[in-house]
Image: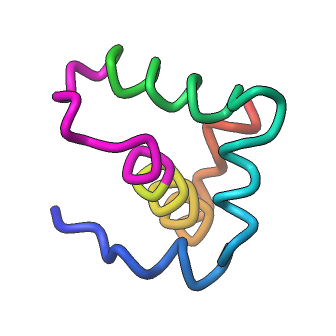
């Protein structure tokens, strides 16, 4: 399934880049660990991992299933 690349960016704008750099890039490193755990290649960026997670979370909320982030 193709994830629209602009959906999360339109919501978060430049705040996303700032979040990736905050706390010694803790979020960036966490996203890379998620990528590695999913078995994705290094060509997939942390930003893309974030985009997919945000899209999936938004999609789940729209269906009323809740978010994995809330568990």
Give above or below for 34 relative to 6.
above
In the displayed image of the protein, which residue is found farthest to the right? 23
Q: How many marks?
A: 0
- Going by the image, does 61 lie left or right of 50? right
Picture quarter with the C terminus: top right
Residue 46 position, x and y percent, is: 44, 41
Could you tell me which residue is drawn at 58 percent across and 52 percent down? 65
Could you tell me which residue is drawn at 57 percent across and 85 percent down? 10
Give above or below for 10 relative to 1.
below
Could you tell me which residue is drawn at 45 percent across and 55 percent down? 56
Which span is picked out in magenta? 38-50
Quarter-of-image position of residue 4: bottom left
Residue 50 position, x and y percent, is: 50, 49
Give above or below for 36 relative to 13.
above
Asked if residue 41 is among those painted magenta in the image, a careful observer would answer: yes
Picture quarter with the N terminus: bottom left
Quarter-of-image position of residue 30: top right
- Going by the image, does 53 lie left or right of 68? left
- Going by the image, does 41 lie left or right of 24? left
Could you tell me which residue is drawn at 57 percent across and 71 percent down? 62
Asked if residue 15 is among those painted magenta in the image, a careful observer would answer: no
Residue 32 position, x and y percent, is: 44, 26
Looking at the picture, the colour scheme in use is: rainbow
Quarter-of-image position of residue 25: top right
Secondary structure mostly seen in the magenta stretch: loop
């Amino acid at each position: 399934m193709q994830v629209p690349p602009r959906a999360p960016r339109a919501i978060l704008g430049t705040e996303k880049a700032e979040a990736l750099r905050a706390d010694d890039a803790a979020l960036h490193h966490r996203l890379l660990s998620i990528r590695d755990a999913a078995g994705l290649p290094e060509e997939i960026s942390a930003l893309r991992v974030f985009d997919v997670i945000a899209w999936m979370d938004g999609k789940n909320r729209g269906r009323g299933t809740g978010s994995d982030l809330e568990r």
